[in-house]
């Protein structure tokens, strides 16, 4: 999975360049909850909602809410500062 492309398509305003793939993965693991991380990765890998339901053992509404929460976190200034190289 390409973390850089996945992050770029969700961040509204990005100033600077993103860090390396390994660093991005570590930051996402640290900043997201386990469910948010799994949900974000599953959606970005193109899995269907049914596959994600089986993976997380949650209903569609909770999965959508978790994904939206992850996207909101990505757009927080503090989060964005960690993703970008200075």
Image (cartoon, rainbow, N blue to C red):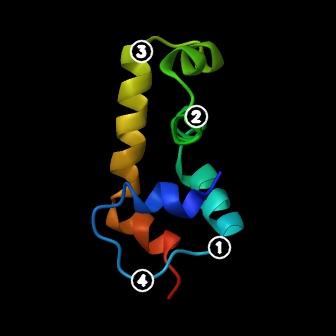
Q: Height in image: 26 above or below 69?
A: below
In the image as oriented, which residue stretches furthest toward the bottom?
86
| Tag of residue 20 | 1
Which residue was labeled with disc 2? 42
| Location of residue 41 (image quadrant) | top right
Q: Height in image: 42 above or below 50?
A: below
Q: CA distance from mark 3 to mark 2?
A: 13 Å
Q: Earlier in the sequence, mark 4 or mark 2?
A: 4
Which residue was labeled with disc 3? 60
Circle 3 residues within 10 Å: few <14, some 14–19, many ≥20: few
Q: CA distance from mark 4 to mark 1?
A: 13 Å
Q: CA distance from mark 1 to mark 3?
A: 32 Å
**Looking at the image, do the residues carrying marks 3 and 2 touch, with CB atoms under 8 Å apart?**
no
Front residue of 79 and 11:
11
Q: Residue at x 40, y 55 (%)?
A: 74
As helix, strand or loop, the secondary structure at mark 4 comes to loop
Q: Residue at x 52, y 23 (%)?
A: 48
**Looking at the image, do the residues carrying marks 4 and 2 touch, with CB atoms under 8 Å apart?**
no
Query: Can you give x and y, in whole percent of width and height, for residue 30 in the image?
Result: 61, 53
Query: Can you give x and y, in whole percent of width and height, for residue 38 in the image?
Result: 60, 35
Q: Height in image: 43 above or below 15?
A: above
Q: CA distance from mark 3 to mark 4?
A: 35 Å
Q: Earlier in the sequence, mark 1 or mark 2?
A: 1
Which residue was labeled with disc 4? 16
Q: Is residue 70 left or right of residue 43?
A: left
Q: CA distance from mark 1 to mark 2?
A: 20 Å
Q: Residue at x 39, y 67 (%)?
A: 78
């Amino acid at each position: 999975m390409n973390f850089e492309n996945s992050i770029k398509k969700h961040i509204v305003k990005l100033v600077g360049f993103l860090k390396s793939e390994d660093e991005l993965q570590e930051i996402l693991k640290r900043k997201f909850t386990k469910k948010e991380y799994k949900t974000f990765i599953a959606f970005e890998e193109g899995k269907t909602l049914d596959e994600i339901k089986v993976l997380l053992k949650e209903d569609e509404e909770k999965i959508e809410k978790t994904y939206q929460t992850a996207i909101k976190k990505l757009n927080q200034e503090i989060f964005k500062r960690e993703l970008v190289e200075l």
